[in-house]
Image (tube, rainbow, N blue to C red):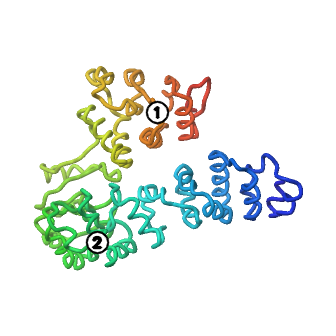
């Protein structure tokens, strides 16, 4: 059978029939007619079987068969989010499979350069209300598409719906000033060396914005001069300004947010020079408020923010007050106690009752290398246990408990 599949020998299966285990090896053939023969003779191709077929076809980079299922099965879009990785996303994008449920993954890893122009409209229609969607915050090609006249009405409506308005510095010239009328805040992401002539020419487009956050990304290497910094408009607040490392003087408001892309703490000499500098750090002052933030992030589907909030819990030492309050319903979703299970108070109070979207996304972002050795104390439902086991190669099951290979 496997030899016939590799040789794309349709006649073999027409004459000999279809083996029961054939679905395990369909990824070996590139002959669509063989796959179609199998599908037509299996009225109930289960979700599990289809998922395994697609998984193996992706691993084998078997484009013809991926294209076949992409053209004939509407449920492929529901399967792909559980299969996509940074290693296979580029191949998936080259097939005819429906990627409509992969946009959030693409946004999380900033892979918008893989999108085709034909994807941009679908992206907007499906996700324009999402926290991570910023038409002018991604690639130049995308920004140019969304700046065209036929998109103006949609984009104008979009800007009335969102709270955060982010624009990459290289896309400033594409922003219609009318889109920012009456808005109080906008963020310009400085992800490349600033061209001050370009910046000064186009900052006027944001003249109706009350406050502009000029947010510098990690290692963007902006060696701005004192004169250039002095030329910034008065309504600008600087976020993570790298140029302060070069002893530049600055009278504008400054904040340092180390929750953005693991930004490093500001050096001591900057803290001494700017004593009013506000640093958003990882310290948890109120566990109840922290869980509330996690609840809001999960409700909004903001998984990056949820991960950032979750990461702060691993090293958090529970106070006696915290330990007692964990049993209170006021603390919110007890699912969020998982990063704290090294503490017996947290492990006893932890509850994961159902595997809904929030639970799945939360369990995906957990660092099991940090809590894995404590998981065997927990008794999870079968479906939850199986889901967790898939998240880390060092996890294994024994007597219906999850263990971590040290």
Q: Which residue is mark 1?
A: 354
Q: Position of residue 95 (x, y in %)?
A: 59, 65
Q: Position of residue 239 (x, y in %)?
A: 22, 57
- Kindly give the residue lying farthest to the right in the view shown: 15
Q: Is residue 139 above or below residue 296?
A: below
Give the residue at x 43% y 65%. Answer: 122
**Residue 120 badge:** none
The quadrant in which residue 342 appears is: top left
Location of the N terminus by quadrant is: bottom right
At horizontal 14% and vertical 53% (from top left) the residue drawn is 273
Using the image, determine if residue 371 lies above or below residue 391.
Answer: above
231 up-or-down from 319: above or below = below
The residue indicated by pointer 2 is 153
Q: Give the quadrant of the C terminus.
A: top right
Total numbered badges shown on the rendered structure: 2
404 vs 219, left or right, is right
Residue, x 48% and y 56% (percent of image)?
101
- Distance of mark 2 from mark 1, alpha carbons? 41 Å
The numbered mark, 2 or 1, whose residue comes first in the sequence reads: 2
Whether 170 is drawn above or below 247: the answer is below
Q: Left or right? Give the position of 255 relative to 379.
A: left
Q: For residue 77, what is the image quadrant?
A: bottom right
Packing grade of label 2 (10 A; few <14, some 14-19, many >=20) is few
Residue 173, position as x, y percentages in the image: 26, 77
Q: Is residue 25 visible?
A: yes
């Amino acid at each position: 059978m496997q030899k016939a599949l590799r040789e794309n020998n349709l006649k073999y299966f027409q004459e000999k029939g279809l083996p029961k285990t054939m679905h395990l090896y369909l990824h070996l053939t590139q002959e669509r007619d063989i796959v179609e023969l199998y599908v037509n003779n299996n009225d109930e191709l289960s979700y599990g079987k289809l998922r395994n077929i697609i998984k193996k076809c992706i691993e084998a980079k078997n484009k013809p068969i991926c294209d076949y299922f992409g053209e004939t099965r509407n449920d492929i879009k529901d399967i792909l989010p559980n299969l996509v990785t940074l290693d296979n996303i580029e191949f998936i994008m080259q097939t005819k499979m429906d990627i409509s449920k992969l946009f959030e993954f693409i946004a999380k890893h900033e892979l918008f350069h893989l999108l085709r122009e034909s994807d941009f409209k679908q992206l907007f229609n499906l996700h324009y209300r999402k926290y991570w969607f910023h038409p002018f915050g991604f690639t130049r090609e995308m920004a140019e598409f969304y700046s065209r006249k036929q998109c103006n009405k949609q984009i104008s409506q979009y800007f009335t719906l969102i709270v955060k308005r982010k624009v990459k510095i290289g896309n400033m010239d594409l922003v219609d000033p009318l889109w920012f009328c009456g808005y109080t805040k906008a963020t310009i992401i400085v992800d490349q060396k600033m061209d001050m002539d370009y910046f000064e020419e186009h900052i006027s487009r944001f003249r109706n914005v009350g406050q502009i956050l000029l947010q510098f990304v990690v290692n963007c290497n902006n060696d701005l001069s004192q004169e250039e910094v002095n030329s910034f408009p008065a309504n600008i607040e600087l976020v993570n300004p790298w140029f302060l490392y070069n002893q530049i003087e600055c009278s504008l408001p400054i904040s340092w947010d180390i929750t953005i892309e693991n930004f490093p703490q500001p050096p001591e000499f900057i803290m001494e020079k700017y004593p009013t500098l506000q640093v958003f750090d990882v310290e948890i002052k109120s566990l109840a408020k922290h869980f509330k933030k996690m609840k809001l992030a999960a409700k909004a589907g903001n998984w990056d923010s949820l991960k950032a909030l979750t990461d702060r819990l691993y090293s958090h030492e529970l106070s006696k007050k915290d330990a007692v309050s964990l049993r209170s319903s006021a603390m919110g979703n007890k699912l969020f106690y998982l990063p704290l299970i090294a503490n017996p108070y947290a492990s006893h109070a932890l509850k994961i009752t159902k595997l809904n979207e929030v639970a799945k996304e939360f369990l995906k972002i957990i660092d099991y290398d940090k809590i894995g050795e404590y998981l065997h104390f927990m008794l999870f439902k079968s479906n939850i246990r199986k889901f967790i086991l898939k998240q880390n190669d060092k996890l294994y099951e024994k007597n219906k408990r999850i263990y971590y290979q040290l």
